[in-house]
């Protein structure tokens, strides 16, 4: 059964669907459904065949790699209006694990029906390749930043990005995700993350209030994130 327009309208312009015509989007939407997961549910595991891909409607999920000793490396935190597992459509198998971090509603799309449209519509296929190419370049740039930037640059850049992504002009960043997951996503240990937050607080650039951080000196934080100035840790 096709989802109500009230659901579909909210995800209509994410990157994978933005260039679809109304008819093309309707065809994809006919093979979608709303699914609910509890905290900690596994959505798919590395090596699983890709039967469907998801859009997060509400809640939060993580994409991660897991070592045999149980250690996890968070690759991406996926929130509302973001895609999950769409890249596996083209290679057949998922290259990482995915699990929910809280009660989460996902819109599941049938991979085969989406690929069938690409097979019969070369123009659509080219548009999708262009969009996914841009997304891949953004991911490559992000990996480069994780490799080349210092830990304090990564943390301050994360704080700035979270602030800029808010719908209002508030300088308060709220941690809706456990700090150890944020640290893993940034490629630092939880201890290093905490030390950097403490250093920025001691320098008067931020203030910590429960699960929120108040950015008191955004200009200096941007300079640290850009590598213009540095702080000894």
Image: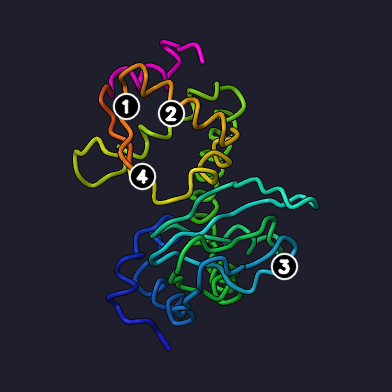
User: Mark 1 = which residue?
Assistant: 206
Up-down relation of residue 209 to residue 207 (above or below): below
| Among the 4 quarters of the image, the one containing residue 115 | bottom right
User: Mark 3 = which residue?
Assistant: 48
Earlier in the chain: of badge 3 and badge 2, it is 3
- Secondary structure of the residue carrying tag 2 is helix
Q: Is residue 223 magenta?
A: yes
- Secondary structure of the residue carrying tag 1 is strand
Earlier in the chain: of badge 3 and badge 1, it is 3
User: Mark 2 = which residue?
Assistant: 197
Up-down relation of residue 57 to residue 35 (above or below): above
Q: Give the alpha-carbon distance from disc 1 to disc 4, as whole Å.
A: 13 Å
Earlier in the chain: of badge 4 and badge 3, it is 3
Q: Give the alpha-carbon distance from disc 1 to disc 2, as whole Å.
A: 8 Å
Q: Give the alpha-carbon distance from disc 3 to disc 1, as whole Å.
A: 43 Å
In the image, the segment drawn in magenta is 218-233
Q: Is residue 18 magenta?
A: no
Percent x, y for residue 19? 40, 58
Q: Give the alpha-carbon distance from disc 2 to disc 4, as whole Å.
A: 12 Å
Up-down relation of residue 26 to residue 171 (above or below): below
């Amino acid at each position: 059964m096709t989802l109500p327009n009230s659901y579909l309208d909210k995800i209509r312009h994410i990157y994978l669907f933005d260039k679809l015509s109304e008819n093309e989007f309707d065809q994809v939407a006919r093979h979608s459904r709303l699914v609910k997961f509890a905290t900690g549910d596994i959505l798919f595991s590395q090596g699983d065949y890709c039967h469907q891909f998801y859009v997060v409607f509400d809640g939060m999920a993580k994409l991660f790699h897991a070592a045999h000793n149980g250690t996890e490396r968070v690759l991406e935190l996926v929130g509302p209006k973001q895609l999950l597992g769409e890249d596996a459509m083209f290679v057949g198998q998922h290259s990482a694990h995915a699990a929910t971090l809280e009660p989460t509603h996902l819109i599941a799309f049938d991979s085969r029906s989406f690929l069938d449209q690409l097979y019969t519509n070369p123009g659509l296929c080219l548009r999708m390749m262009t969009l996914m190419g841009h997304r891949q370049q953004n991911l490559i740039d992000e990996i480069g930043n994780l490799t080349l930037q210092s830990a304090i640059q990564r943390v301050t850049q994360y704080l700035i990005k979270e602030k800029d992504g808010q719908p209002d002009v508030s300088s308060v960043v709220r941690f809706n995700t456990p700090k150890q997951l944020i640290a893993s996503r940034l490629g630092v240990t939880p201890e290093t993350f905490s030390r950097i937050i403490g250093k920025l607080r001691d320098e008067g650039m931020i203030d910590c209030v429960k699960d929120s951080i108040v950015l008191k000196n955004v200009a200096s934080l941007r300079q640290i994130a850009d590598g213009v100035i540095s702080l000894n840790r």
